Image (spheres, helix red, strand yellow):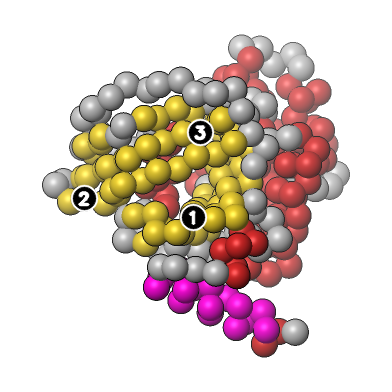
Amino acid sequence: MGITEKTKGAQPDIVMDLKNLYVSIDRTELLKHIDMRIEKEEVVALVGESGSGKTLTSKFILGILPERSVVSYDKFYKTPKTGAVFQNSFTSLNPTVKIGSQLMRLYQSHYGETDNWKRKVVPLLEKAGIQNIDKFLKKYPHESSGGERQRVAIAGALISNPDLLIADEVTTALDLRTKLEVIKLFKNIRKELGITILFITHDLSSIKDFANRVYVMYKGEIVEENTCEELFRHQTHPYAKRIIGFANSLWTRDR
């Protein structure tokens, strides 16, 4: 991985600041001119169709790009305390280990001991909406629903008390009712814990009453950035006009 400049510091109220990011893999340029800034306790949405570069951007932020990636940027700052939740929560859980044991090990990886793991984990599972927790912790992942596994993944990401939580397509594989419940959960997390959230999605219905600001990504570039309210009122880039117009037409039809 090639990097042209080392990470620089940022102001205390900034949890992530990125300027002029380029990423290429196998000589194919996949991200270019990426500027993104996230302030403390914001919910920032990164939206765009599949293949637009959203997940690749999140992988750069988390430092998990493929080794063959070539990267350059002018500036990059990120709070050291960053958590992440991804689309397929089942793949983040070991199918052969009970859920409680996995959360205990995750706690141990952060704090170096296991004596107090339930004192930390149980309240997070309660906030995530898990019922009958003692019984639930004894289950294997396949014995829980997709919504429950996603809630476990969210609780697991909160064990380290992150300042920034990256949620990458977390509602994609969920039914409508569960999706709404997960969005409500993220709203509560932000309100109760004061965590800053980068919410990555192609589903505009999930951000309209949730995000403070929105970045629109198209073919590896940020083509639009505005507050959520203003973006739904006015767009300049043709792609942003298309996806917002389509979303607005669906909401109008549903009323």
Q: Nearer the viewer, residue 50 or 196?
A: 196
**What is the number of the mark on residue 29?**
2
Mark whose residue sits in front, 1 or 3 = 1
Amino acid carrying label 1: it is Glu
User: Which residue is identified by label 3?
Assistant: 16
Q: Nearer the viewer, residue 194 or 227?
A: 227
Residue ID at (45%, 59%): 224
Q: Main secondary structure of the magenta part?
A: helix
User: Which residue is identified by label 1?
Assistant: 225
Instruction: Count the marks.
Output: 3
Q: Nearer the viewer, residue 186 or 93?
A: 186
Residue ID at (60%, 83%): 249
- Which element is circle 3 on? strand
Q: Is label 3 in contact with label 2 (beta carbons under 8 Å)?
A: no
Q: Which residue, as the protein is rendered here, is positioned at the far right?
A: 132
Q: Which residue, as the protein is rendered here, is positioned at the far left?
A: 27
Residue 203 in view here? yes
Q: Position of residue 103 (x, y in %)?
A: 65, 31
Q: Is residue 202 left or right of residue 42?
A: left
Q: Is label 1 in contact with label 2 (beta carbons under 8 Å)?
A: no
The vertical placement of 90 against 79, above or below, is: below
Amino acid carrying label 2: it is Glu
Q: Position of residue 65 (x, y in %)?
A: 33, 38
The span picked out in magenta is 238-252
Which of the 4 quarters of the picture holds residue 14?
A: top right
**Dot placed on the residue nearer the N-terminal end, 3 or 2:** 3
Q: CA distance from mark 3 to mark 2?
A: 23 Å
Q: Is label 1 in contact with label 3 (beta carbons under 8 Å)?
A: no
Estimate how packed mark 3 is, as few (under 14), some (14 to 19) or many (20 or more) residues with alpha carbons within 10 Å.
Answer: many
